[in-house]
Amino acid sequence: MECQKEMNMEQRCNCTYSGCRRAGICCDCLAYHLQSRQLPACCFPEDVEKTWDRSFETFASLVSSGRV
């Protein structure tokens, strides 16, 4: 499978961490975050993503409140 980094960056990736070397490379990003009990930026609304708290717990609270 060929990585579609350009399309991911245009349409899906909302990561605001400027030094991220995994931006747009979804498989690497997901693997990285899962090993730290986190989800990638694209799972969060923009205002929450900017806090860089991508924990499972934060995601669960967003689901409970109906935000995602």
Image (cartoon, rainbow, N blue to C red):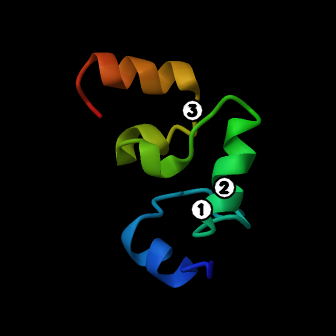
Where disc 1 sits, the SS reads helix
Which one is nearer the viewer's eye here, 9 or 46? 9
Disc 3 versus disc 2: distance between alpha carbons? 15 Å
Residue drawn 52% across the image and 37% down it:
51
Front: mark 1 or 3: 1
Percent across and percent down for residue 42 are 45, 51
The residue beneath circle 2 is 29
Residue drawn 68% across the image and 38% down it:
34
- Which image quarter holds the N terminus? bottom right
Tell me the amino acid under the disc marked 3: Asp
Disc 1 versus disc 2: distance between alpha carbons? 5 Å
Which one is nearer the viewer's eye here, 4 or 46? 4
Tell me the amino acid under the disc marked 2: Cys
In the rendered structure, find residue 53 and report the number of the disc placed on it: 3
Instruction: Answer left or right for 19 relative to 39.
Output: right
In the rendered structure, find residue 26 and report the number of the disc placed on it: 1
As drawn, 42 above or below 62: below
Residue extending furthest toward the front: 1
Q: How many marks?
A: 3
Residue drawn 51% across the image and 48% down it:
41
Disc 1 versus disc 3: distance between alpha carbons? 18 Å
Question: Splitting the image into 4 quarters, where does residue 28 fall?
Answer: bottom right
Tell me the amino acid under the disc marked 1: Cys
Of marks 1 and 3, which one's residue comes earlier in the chain?
Answer: 1
Do labels 1 and 2 touch, CB within 8 Å?
yes
Where disc 3 sits, the SS reads loop
Q: Which class describes the residues within 10 Å of circle 2: few (<14), some (14-19), or many (20+)?
A: some
Percent across and percent down for residue 68 are 29, 34
Where disc 2 sits, the SS reads helix
Of marks 3 and 2, which one's residue comes earlier in the chain?
Answer: 2
